[in-house]
Amino acid sequence: MRLSHTLTLTAMLAASTLVAPLAFADAEDFPAKDVQYVIPFGPGGESDISARLQQKYFEEITGQQLIIQYMPGGGGAVGWSQLNDMTADGHTIMGSNLPHIVLKPMGKDAGFATEDVNNFYFFHYSPDAILVREDSPYQTLDDLIEAARQAPGVVTFSGSGTYSANDVANTRFQQLADVTTTYIPFKGTGAAVTALLGGQVQAEWGYTTVAANHQDKVRMLAVAAEERHPLFPDVPTFQELGYDMVGGAYRGMAVPSETPADVQARLSEIFDQINQNPQFRQEMEDLGFVLMDVGNDDVADFLAEQSQQYETSARELGLID
Amino acid sequence: MSAVHNRSTGRNTSAARKEKHAIQASCSRASEYLVPTLFVVGAGLCLWETREMSQLGAVFPAVISLVVIVAGLLRLGQLGLRGVVASQERGSDPSSDPSSDSGSGSTPRRLALVGIMLAWALALPWLGFLLTGLASFVGLMMVAQYRRWHPRRLAGHLLTGAVLVAFFYALFALVLNVPLPAGRWFTL
Amino acid sequence: MDLIVHALGALSPLNLALALLGVTAGIVIGALPGLSATMAVAVLVPVTFGMAPESALIMLGAIYTGAIYGGSYSAILVNTPGTPSAIATTFDGYPMARRGDGDLAVTLSTIASVVGGLVGVLALLLLAPLLAQVALSFGPVEYFWLAIFGLTLISALSEDSTLKGFMGAGFGLLLSTVGVAVIGGDIRYTYGSPVLLGGIETVSALIGLYCIPVLIDLVATPAAHLKVDGVSRGVRFREGMAIAIKGKLNLLRSATIGTGVAILPGAGGSIASLVSYSEARRVADEPASFGKGNPQGVLATEAANNATVGGGFIPTLVLGIPGTPPDAVILGALLVQGFRTGPELFTTNAGITYTFVAGLFLATCLLLPLGLLIGRYAFKSIISIPKALLVPTIAFMTVIGTYAIRNSASDVVIMLCLGVLGWVLNRYGFRPSPIVLGLILGPIAEQGFVQGFLMGRASGSLFATFFGGPISLTIIALSLLSVFYPMVKARREARRQDKTINGEASP
């Protein structure tokens, strides 16, 4: 039975913990034991859910478990500031999020620098999207922009956090559409969507994932992805509507910087294999995520490109001069 | 309460009346003034620091600091107007007060407990969980023991302690997958 | 009659065994300070991936139910809330245990948890789609007022001086602002330390403020931790039932409040139990006896916090918005398993929902025998362990529990510092409860206020935003009532007493 299977695993885990100091990191037989996957946020969020989806395929590929841990606090800062103190043998990996790891260190006292987070793979992103209630008078993005233009500051958007993906998106949107809106930060996407559904705000900066979760109650006006999302073939992208916005919350994995290069490459390989699994792709897409395969070799370029964009937005937000 | 009345009847009436309205100190008279003063000073520092925050971030801590300052000043005013009587002078009823233990008892043992636990917490990342756990367990056992140690009792306690530490270690590290610190022997 | 079919489905021997296992594991985890219901559920999630969906849901519900209930053990026996929902259980539960009624308090908590749990589950079964709409009518402003209402409890919690209570609560509120601000993004009061970036963790603060003072005083004297009569009186079930029947109105009211508060996604079990505690105290004939070991206090908080289990699932299942943190984990597990939340869960996909509800129902009923059994064992071990073992064991649990919350050794240091500070302040007449109240309500009050301010500024009328809604006005009225009613009542009482004294004096 499944339960006895778990017990066996627990026993094996016990044994492996005892011999752990003897095991040495070698890419050939990596992973030699279970891998700890630290999510620098609380349980139940999108970082958690997407990690949970990877969990089962990781076990299929490697025969070892991927154990999810949470280290919430400071919008991820608590986790990332401790990443390089962790065991650097590849058996400890940490979730990594953009724009968080770029924007956080721009403020004072963040406790870590962007370079401290040694990413080896970015596997998906949740594209930014503007959501309104099903019964909202705004049918299209133009309706909303028109309303915002007529009464600057009156149209309210809920979103998750300050200096977050949502905040950046709103700033960029205001600039591109030349309107003024009021952005109201909430603690997490759940609280932001509650405010939208309850009618406390007129629109929400959310993600395709939020729309996928609340399909019957919200209408998505535009998506900040390169192409339309398969779940929402009728929703235009911002680019189609003439606004050059592609972005969202990108999620990947990082290891402590001392981790051997070959182990890091092997990890990237494993997660790439998960990303190519058609069943995994389907499950991710059903939840509204957009998959991407930025492996170990491409991470640096990808980060550099993204950082440049965020710097512009950060200047707009007044985070840096 | 009857004890209070009996005692105050022996004094002259005006003093007794004053004492009836006076505030009974939880501890010493001076501390009754000192603690609110510390609260006011602390809140003042918090208020001072809100200058560097953004408007949205500053409004809440500033309001709360002000509330604490006002409450502290009101308390000091109340103390000044009504006077304070140290708690020893007015026999307090120990059974009704949950904090009655606080004054009496062995201060060295209290300090030892806090000291051991603090050392434990600070050594945790360096020496690892098992070692610090066992050491502190034994240490706290000594602090909490009032009777004399018989070899058999000591052995029994030590064994129970070891079993308990092992049980919790297994529960947390193996069943609940908490990555307990293994220690940083190599970086020491 | 789908319901009965699915309920029977839930009763298969395997599911029954899983529920039994889940409740037991939940009780143990919940009873250990630091191991919250959220953690219990999160640990179990990967195990459930391999199970049939019904069994997985039943086991998750069972462990959640058990954990919320288990929190009352440590609250009653060592004055440490095992989960934040059990904070108010310490107010009367621990004084009861001190005077030798620990067994009775545990029994009462078991009875109240079963009643509360059942009310919550019934609400989930019968009223879910309707009640979910209530959740949506609570906006930032309503949450702000709700937090203010919670803060009115300060005057009740600070026995000797309300001003001291205000200072303590202010200290707690300031503590809650440490770290990165959700709104504005400021980094506040961290003094450059990355450890404080994540703020003061509520549960570790609870452990520090409630449990460390108990330990400090425990080692100071050779006297036993809890008073014992020497005679074993079993679980005192009959006595407990008699008290529960006497307090049946209190039980039902508290369970209803618990369900109602749990529906609000921003509130949670700690607020539910605090609100029902303060209501129980307000309507009681002798409010002064609360906080000194009144059994009704235990009934009120435990009925309320177990009602949050069923209540919290209402927004989770209907709206896809988790009502409490453990619900967030269960919702995540549901999404990973491929379920979609929404009203269909009560129509087309009712099968899975009814099985789940039946599982919760079953788990709640299992609380009674299991709770009495484990509770009796917990009580017996606490009173029979010699002090030299009890002290290090409790200390060990506080350290490992605090560490486990965020895998942080720094949290252990913070917990200890707060504990020592709490002991010192308690000595000078500042109780820990107002501090904790501030710490818990701080974020709700702050975010509600600033969000309301931004909304009001956008709409052009701050006044209408804060004082416009019927819900806001109701909560404001309740807050005023809660502050002034005790004063009015006391004055009326004093007048009546004066009259009787005068009446006796003049023939």
Image: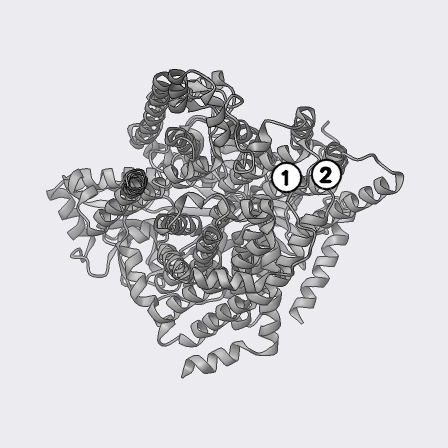
Taking the spot 34% from the left edge, 20% from the top edge, the residue there is: B73
Is B58 on the left or on the right of C410, as rendered?
A: left
Which colour scheme appears in the figure? one colour
Which x, y percent locates residue C171?
42, 30
Label 2 sits on what residue type?
Gly
Label 1: how many residues lie within 10 Å, few (<14), some (14-19) or many (20+)? many
Chain containing mark 1: C
Look at the image and tell me whether residue C185 can be seen: yes
Q: Secondary structure at mark 2?
A: helix
Look at the image and tell me whether residue A70 can be seen: no
Q: Which mark is residue B133?
A: 2
Chain containing mark 2: B
Label 1 sits on what residue type?
Val
Disc 1: which residue: C399
Taking the spot 44% from the left edge, 48% from the top edge, the residue there is: C270
- Circles 1 and 2, Cβ within 8 Å, touching? The answer is yes
Compared with residue A250, is residue C457 higher up or lower down, i.e. above or below? above
Work out how far the residue at label 1 is from the one at label 2, CA to CA, in angstroms.
9 Å
Which x, y percent locates residue B171?
68, 52
Q: Nearer the viewer, residue A321 or B82?
A: B82
Is C309 on the left or on the right of A208, as rendered?
A: right
Taking the spot 76% from the left edge, 46% from the top edge, the residue there is: A23
Q: Quadrant of the C terminus of chain B?
A: top right
Which x, y percent locates residue C274?
41, 47
Q: Secondary structure at mark 1?
A: helix
Residue farthest toward the right in the current orientation of the protein: B151
